[in-house]
Each structure stands twice: as C-alpha cells, then as structure tokens.
Amino acid sequence: MMAFVRRTQRSVAAFAVVPAVVATLALAGGLGPVLLGLFGTVVLAAGVTVASRRVVSLGALAVFGGVLVAGTTDGSTALLVLAAAGTVASWSTGQHVVGLAHQLGREAGVRRSVLAHLAGTTAISLSAGAVGLVTSRAAGGAVPAVAAAFLLVGVVALLVALRS
Amino acid sequence: MSRTIDAPAVFDHPLALFAGLVGAALGVAAVAGVVVVPPPPERPVVTAVGAGLVLGGIVVVGRRLRTAVDQADPPAVELRGDVTVPGASLDRAIETTVRGSLEERAAARQRVTDRIREVAAGVLATVERVPVDEAEERVAAGEWPADTSPADVEDEPTGQVTRDRLRQALGRRTSVERSVARTVAALAEATPGLSGSDPEGTPSRAVERAVAVDGEDADPDLTTGPGDRRTRRWVGVVGAAMLAVGVGIFATLEGTGPSLVVASAAVVGAAGYAVTATAPEVSLAVERRVDDDQPDPGEDVEVTVTVEHTGESWLADLRVVDGVPDGLRVVEGSPRYATALRPGESVRFSYVVEATRGDHAFDPLRAVARDASGATERERPVEATGATTIECVPDLDAAVSVPVFAQAARRTGRVRTDTGGEGVEFHSVREYRRGDPLSRVDWNRVATAGEFATLQFNEERAATVVVVVDARRPAYVTGDPAGPAVPERQLEAADRLASSLLSAGDSVGLAAFSPEWCWLGPRGGDTQRARIRRQLATHPAFGSERPTDPFYGRPPLRRLREELPGHAQLVVCSPLSDDYAVELLREFHHRGHPVTVVSPDPTGGDSPGRRLAAVERAVRVSRLRRSGVRVVDWPPGESLAAALDAAEGRWS
C-alpha cells in the first residue's frame, strides 16, 4: 500500500553529506579537528537520514567545532576557509533535505532541487570566504586582530540590525 | 491565513545599526593601515571583545536548537481525505507519548488514559448492566478491568521515553503500546463477540503513517495556507560566525594567524545572503492531464502534471503539490515535486490514482517557492488547465436474500404473519362462515363429524421496507484506506438490499441519515428499482465528500419520522461508528419501526487504537441487539450474501 511517508530519500541524503566530508578532509592537518569533523559528519548523515533538523544542526556544530580547534593552530587559512564553507553548505543542504522530507515525503522527485540548493549555498559561502581571504592577503596576510575584529563585529551588528 | 514577509528593517534596530556602521568603518580603516583608535590597551579590550563574541555566539547558537522552522505544510493529498480510520487518533496519541516534547507527551498520555477509561466504562456498563456513572467510577477506581488498568500509562516514569525511543528504533513495541494493548485485550475479552488475544502485531506507528485524517481536525497551527513567511531556518548561524571570530581573537592573542577570523567570512556571507533574501515571484502555468476521465471504480488513472515557469527570473527552489481530489488515493508515484526552474523552463511529473465512486474535482495545485537560501517562502495556489474532474459511476447488481421483520402491509407478499387466512402453512381451524372459499373447507371433518369448518393458514403479506443509508459525517470511515471505503460498501449494500426486497415483492423506499434531505416513498416494482438506483448514484446525500454539518435533531430527521408510513420497517446500512447511531436506531425501533442494521465493519488491524475501536463497536452492536434491533455484521472481505446468511442463522 502506498502512503505519504515523511522520510528522507536515500538517493539525495548523500548530497548533503559530501560538503561535510570535504570539510573534514580540509581539517586533516590536526588530529583533534579531523576527529571532530568525522564525528560531526556521521551525526549529520544520521540526522539527514532520520529527517531531524536538530540532529543535522548538532552534527554541523561538531564539524564547526573542528574548524574552531583547527583555527587555534597555525594552519593554512585557505583550507580553513574551505572547511568553514563546507560546514555551512552541508548544514544548509542537510536542512533542505530534511525540509523536503517533511514537506514532500519519500516518493517525490527532489533531486534537482537538492542539487540546486547545494550548488547555491556552496557558491555563496565559498565566495564570501574567498572575499575574506583576498582581503586578508591584500593586507599582507597580517591583518591586525583589532582591525579584523572591528570589521567582523561591524558585519555581525549589521546582520543583527537587518534581521527582521 | 496570510502573512506577509517583513522587509529587513534596518531602522528597527538603530543601536545595532550604529554600532555596525562604526565597527565596519573602523575595521576598514584599520585594514587600510589608518589607526583611528590607538591600540595601546589592546590586550584587555581585545580579550573583552573576544569573550563577548564567544558568549554571544553560544547564546545565539543555543537559540537555534530551540527554534522551530516554519515551513509550508501541505496536507497529505495522497490519502483519501473523505474517510477516517476508527482508532487512528488513539494510535497517533500513543505515538506522541514517545515522539513529542515533554508537554505533548504528558497531554498525549492523558488523552490515551481518558479514551481507554471511556471505552472501559462503556464495556462494563453493557456487560454487567450497571449505570454508566457507576461503571465510570469503578474504572476510575481501578477496580475494573482486573489485572490491568487504564491508569498504567497516565504518568511517565523517569527515563522511559529514552528506552521507548530505542525500542521504537529497533522496531519493537513501546511500553505504552504494550500497556495499552494489554488493557485493550482485557476489554476485548470481556466484550461479547470479540476475542481477547493480544496479537504481537503492528505497532501503532505503522498505522499512523498510513492515514491522512484521523477523526480529529488537523492542528490549525500546523496547516498553512497561501501566504509569505520567513522560515527562520538561518536563525543561529550568525552565532557560529560570532564564535569563530571570538575564538579567532583569542588565537591571535596567543600568536596564531587570524585565519579563523577570515574563515568566519564564509559563514557571515551565507547568513548575510539569507537575511537579505526575498521570496521570489510565483508565476506558473500548470497543465493537468488524465489518461481516463471516466474510469470504472477500482481502475487506475494516471495523472500527468506539467509545470511551466512563466516568470522573468530564476526559481531556485520550487515545490509543488498537486490538488488530488479528496476521495482519490494515490497508488503509485507522488503528486509532489521539487525542482529549480529557469524562466520558460518546464517540468513534468506523473502519478497514479485509484478511481472510487463519485465525481472528483481536482483542487488547485499548491506551489511553494523559496529564495536560494530558503530563508523566505511564498505559498500560492495555482489553477491548472486541462483535466479538472474524474467521474466514476459504479455498476451495481447481484441479488441477495434479505431477511425482514414480520411486520407487514395489507398486501400479499412473502412475510409470513401470525394472522390466519390465505397462505401455505397451517395456522388453525375455525367454524365455517358463509363466504369462506370451498377450497379451505376441512372436508375430512365434514365426512367424519358432519360439521363444516374452515382451515386457516398463516397469511403471507408484503413488507414495507425503507432502506436507510447512514451518510452522517461519522459514517465516513474505513478500516483500510486502500480498500473500498465504508460509504461505498454502504451504498453497494443499500442497492442490493433494495433490489432484492423489490424482487421478493416488498414495497421499498429509500432515505438517508444525512443533513441533505433524501426521501423516496415505498413502492414496488422495477420502476422503483431504477429510481432507487438513480438516487443512490446521483443524490448529494451520498456524495463522495463528507458532509460538514452535524445531523443531531436536524429537520431531515423530523421530516423522515413524519414521512415514514406507520407500518414501515427500516433496513439501515450503517458502520455503527458512533454512539449516536445507536440512539437513533433504538429510537426508530421503539417507535414501531422495526430496525435491521446491515453494518459494514470499519474496524480491523492490530494496532491498539484500532482494536479499541473494534471493542467500542462490538459494545454498540451488543446494545442494539439487546434492544431487539437485528444487526447483520458485515466484516470486510466477506460477501454481503454470506454476512446475511450468517445473521439469519443467528435469528432462527
């Protein structure tokens, strides 16, 4: 018997996990970050499979924890940007897949929608990261922390102000 | 319910705006090498800023985990929306005792307990013939049923929900399911006509997922209508950026590079895009085709939907749900689709529905369009061109033999009355009166005793029967959303009963318990058969849509009482899905219209909720039988003729 089943389609669940895997690989410079990345990726994959937004968020948070730990050591800034962008893309696509599972169920055709969302969030987060990277390189790789902090605080405050 | 998206309102937060602008300007200046703020007390200031960011980040991220995402929730159009499954609401409540939040779980446990208590009191009152109040007291006091109590599930033991979630993940029954199943088994044991076995059957969860509506109206908070909304899906992401910057500042103080601060740009960029996004314009042309718009009942019909994007800009995220008619069930494929569309591009998808009796009109397709980030959502109905209805006319036939009460009209027929007269079976002998036919004179007695006597036989007369279809809202139930639903089985039964009664020479009328007035006075003959058939196929009272009006004491009921001829008996087709049906039938029976109920059984299935519904119905059947109403229980999967034979065996 057919029924409306609010479950994730196996075939698109993988798309959400790919960026987290990339992020984990980018974190491979240190043991702590890579373990956090692996753990987070597994949790995120589980969250996507059981269609739970919260579990997806917790998994992404673990991967992001890996990014934070990696950031306290001297590593490649470009790889760190890649890892952060991958985390965001994976979290957002995971949320997208879960949303589709709740809204459209297991049987609907959703592949193109998931791919479009994955491409969109990856492009946005990667290009934003690239802008940050180029700015810091332009400043000779030695942006004073105060400057960067002011910049980020400014952006964050603007975002808060913009939040409807 | 329509909400509009609030435009990003910068001026709603002037302080944050000011701080943001100043911070960004100072930052840009510092990057460019212009130091506006002298750096000397760098360390304490920077430490404070970093700590503030980390704390703020944790708060914002934490808020994320408590925020519910708000997205369009289209109804389960795949399933028949015109019927409910008895007991499914209890199964859903049992499911919530494991899945829901703390408050939801407590409320669900209370619902489950109340429901079981209610049914238990009904069983006790019927079986032991005690007043309902007393039965309720005994159940509430835990005296009955003996070994198990409805109150077993009232409170949640610490840690049970975790164990139950684990059990559920392993496909086992949860503790509430087991406890309820035990109580239901005890109730079934006590109920006449049911067995008390506790099948290690389907957990309630499996049923919950197969059913669209369950007798309760959908939670208004969960259903969404056309409108614009913010999904709140990016809430908390800014917190991650704040965490990154805060930790990055500390790292910089320890001498590492500012790479984390740079990396946070990726997060800030994505969140910033989401904040400024607006919902896209929905401009779609939808065409719907069906491969057969006049199918036979049970036939599969393929529906193909083509959605073309007629707007100017990209639709990065489009979800559509076709408006499958309420009375149709999707058996293959899905009426839902998600994609991204360029201007002018179109997408086609198809699904298969199973035709059921009636005229089924398609609803508009629901389109939900989101911006690329998914932060905003616009829901719109879109009218489709092409096929708008599926008409499905049943063909009804096959005669059965229908037992009727010995209450008859003054015409010759097949009801053998207790009155002596013309007939076949010997009744009595009485003195000869002038005018008695010679064929009935007892000549043996004339020969032996020389006196004239007349033989009397049981007179056979025609019955006047009104076939009544219970078409009230609660009667639109089914035990199996996949099989023929009860309304159809009732109509099938009504048609065959009327047809067979007419063949047997009875006068037959037709009426409905429905807010729609439906009445066909009793008559005999083939013309009446055709009239009844047409009425059953076309009258609005028997439509495939569930009536929304209640039936209690409505004018149609009073009018029906007035129209019924005094000697008419009723043959009622009703699933007996609520207690009011019992009251209604008893009342007719006691007012001198003997009632025979042909009741398609809408219960079945092993889940606790559905078994409880079966107990409830068995109690109703038992109460009806006790008041003298004849009940033909018609189980699913059995022929009407077999059910009638079984019932007749019970009466003779």
Image: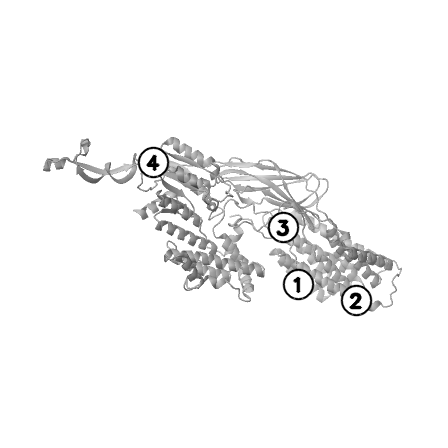
Read off the chain for label 3.
Answer: A
Q: Are marks 3 and 4 on the same chain?
A: no
What is the CA distance from the residue labelled 4 to the residue labelled 2?
96 Å
What is the CA distance from the residue labelled 1 to the residue labelled 2?
32 Å
Label 4 neighbour load within 10 Å: few <14, some 14-19, many 20+: many
- In this view of the protein, can residue B346 be seen by the observer? yes
Callout 3 touching callout 4 (CB < 8 Å): no
Q: Do labels 4 and 1 share a chain?
A: no
Q: What residue type is labelled 4?
A: Asp
Q: Which amino acid does label 1 sit on?
A: Phe
Label 2 neighbour load within 10 Å: few <14, some 14-19, many 20+: some
In which image quadrant can residue A69 be found? Answer: bottom right
What is the CA distance from the residue labelled 2 to the residue labelled 3?
42 Å
Q: Which amino acid does label 2 sit on?
A: Ala
Query: Comparing marks 4 and 1, which lies closer to the viewer?
Result: 4
* Left or right relative to A91: residue B323: left
Callout 1 touching callout 2 (CB < 8 Å): no
According to the picture, the residue beneath numbered tag 4 turns out to be B506
Query: Comparing marks 3 and 1, which lies closer to the viewer?
Result: 3
Q: Where is residue B171 in the image (x, y as percent from the top left)?
A: 52, 59
Q: Where is residue B311 in the image (x, y as percent from the top left)?
A: 70, 39
